[in-house]
Image (cartoon, rainbow, N blue to C red):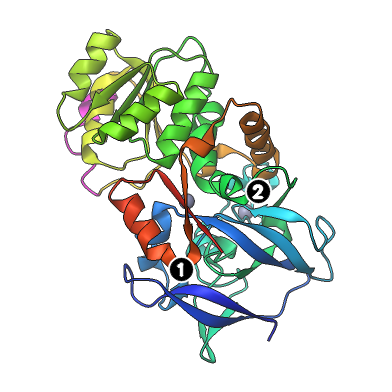
């Protein structure tokens, strides 16, 4: 076997993580071992555990240093710092036409628990378990990652900042700038301001949009949205969101962007997107989400656009986010709070109850 690592193993969907010693498989020619320095905590790590056989190692925003490379790897060398971004097969029609964020094989690559060829990558107590979560399983001191997922970065930005970028910030910023292409003539309603939503606020501000209306139930998060560029905030717990939007922007806004998945967000969007506008959705919606809202969307010819991975190519887009961060235009540091790896359960709890916008664990 290739390498011993300490990983946060989960044994039942939603159960507590336990740090355990695991063995990683030997490298394939296209793979590398990354010594993980930091990994972002994302709701998907918790919500989608039901998709993989247990036990499993999850984590999909890994940042670290390449320790060893497979025989066919030439993009990186040992010692390079990398972000491990979203995987893609590279062979399907969408990948071949530059749309790797909607790779036909996304589901098995993200949630299959194995490599695309079906082979497992992580052993616990001599038995194979689910690894290869987003082809990385980065809640571990070492991870196997395919070369194709890696984004090489300089050493001048701290790992905990980089770890907030490859899913959360990429989805929020890419959703606004690349998928929806919000511009200075547009108003935007941003529903939910966790890590993805706050990144969307920053991006809408960069795009010159007005108004930028942030909606949440947590007053602290709304204060942060104002600091990051929102022009108005609405507390969904105490205010009528659609009525407030009409006051702020009579007739509604051209774009709504939902990262909450809540039925109430879909209803607010249905009443707030102006005719011919677009509702961008980047959260798996609750099953009954469309209840009550289709007539409004229909009567206004609204386009509903589901957004995966911010509709961006990580190797092109993540370096831009890093440059914007260094220029002070993309202050992702205001979202991040770090936890030592052994406090990973606390990091998830802090995210779940809203105390922390973007927890990052440090290995
Ligand atoms: Zn593909
Ligand atoms: Zn994520």
Magenta range: 287-299
On the image, the x and y values in percent for residue 241 come to: 21, 24
Vertical relation: 287 (above or below) 180: below
Q: Earlier in the sequence, mark 1 or mark 2?
A: 2
Residue sitting at 23 percent across and 22 percent down?
271
Q: 10 Å neighbourhood of mark 1: few (<14), some, or many (≥20)?
A: some
Q: Could you say which disc has been placed on residue 95 in the image?
A: 2
Residue sitting at 38 percent across and 44 percent down?
283
Foreground mark, 1 or 2, reads 1
Q: Is mark 2 within 8 Å of ligand 1?
A: yes
On the image, the x and y values in percent for residue 141 come to: 59, 70
Name the foreground residue: 59 vs 227.
227
Vertical relation: 45 (above or below) 189: below
Q: Could you say which disc has been placed on residue 342 in the image?
A: 1
Quarter of the image for the C terminus: give it.
Answer: bottom right
Name the foreground residue: 78 vs 255.
78
On the image, the x and y values in percent for residue 96 come to: 69, 47
**Residue 258 relative to residue 324: left or right:** left
Kindly indicate the quadrant of the structure image that contains residue 161.
top right
Q: Could you say which disc has been placed on residue 80 in the image?
A: none
């Amino acid at each position: 076997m290739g390498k011993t690592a300490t990983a946060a193993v989960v044994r039942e969907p939603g159960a507590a993580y336990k740090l355990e010693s695991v063995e990683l498989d030997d490298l394939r020619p296209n793979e590398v071992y990354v010594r993980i320095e930091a990994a972002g905590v994302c709701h998907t790590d918790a919500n989608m555990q039901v998709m993989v056989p247990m036990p499993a190692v999850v984590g999909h925003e890994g940042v670290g240093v390449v320790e060893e490379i497979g025989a066919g790897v030439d993009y990186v060398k040992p010692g390079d710092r990398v972000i491990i971004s979203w995987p893609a097969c590279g062979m399907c029609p969408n990948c071949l036409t530059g749309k790797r964020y909607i790779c036909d094989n996304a589901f098995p690559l993200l949630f299959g628990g194995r490599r695309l060829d079906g082979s497992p990558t992580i052993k616990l107590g001599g038995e194979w378990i689910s690894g290869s979560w987003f082809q990385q399983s980065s809640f571990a001191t070492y991870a196997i990652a395919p070369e194709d997922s890696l984004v090489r970065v300089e050493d001048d930005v701290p790992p905990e900042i980089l770890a907030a970028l490859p899913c959360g910030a990429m989805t929020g910023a890419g959703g606004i700038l690349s998928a929806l292409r919000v511009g200075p003539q547009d108003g935007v309603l941003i529903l939910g301001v966790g890590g993805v939503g706050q990144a969307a606020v920053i991006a809408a501000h960069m795009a010159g949009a007005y108004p930028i209306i942030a909606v949440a139930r947590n007053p602290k998060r709304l204060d942060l949205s104002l600091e990051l560029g929102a022009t108005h905030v609405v507390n969904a717990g105490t205010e009528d969101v659609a009525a407030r939007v009409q006051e702020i922007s009579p007739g509604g806004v051209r774009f709504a962007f939902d990262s909450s998945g809540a039925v109430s967000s879909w209803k607010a969007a249905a009443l707030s997107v102006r005719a011919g506008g677009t509702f961008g959705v980047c959260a798996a919606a609750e099953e009954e989400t469309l209840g009550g809202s289709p007539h409004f969307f229909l009567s206004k010819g609204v386009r509903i656009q589901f957004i995966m991975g911010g509709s961006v190519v990580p190797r092109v887009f993540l370096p831009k986010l890093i440059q914007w961060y260094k220029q002070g235009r993309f202050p992702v540091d205001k979202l991040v709070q770090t936890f030592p790896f052994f406090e990973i359960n606390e990091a998830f709890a802090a995210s779940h109850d809203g105390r922390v916008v973007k927890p990052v664990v440090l290995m």
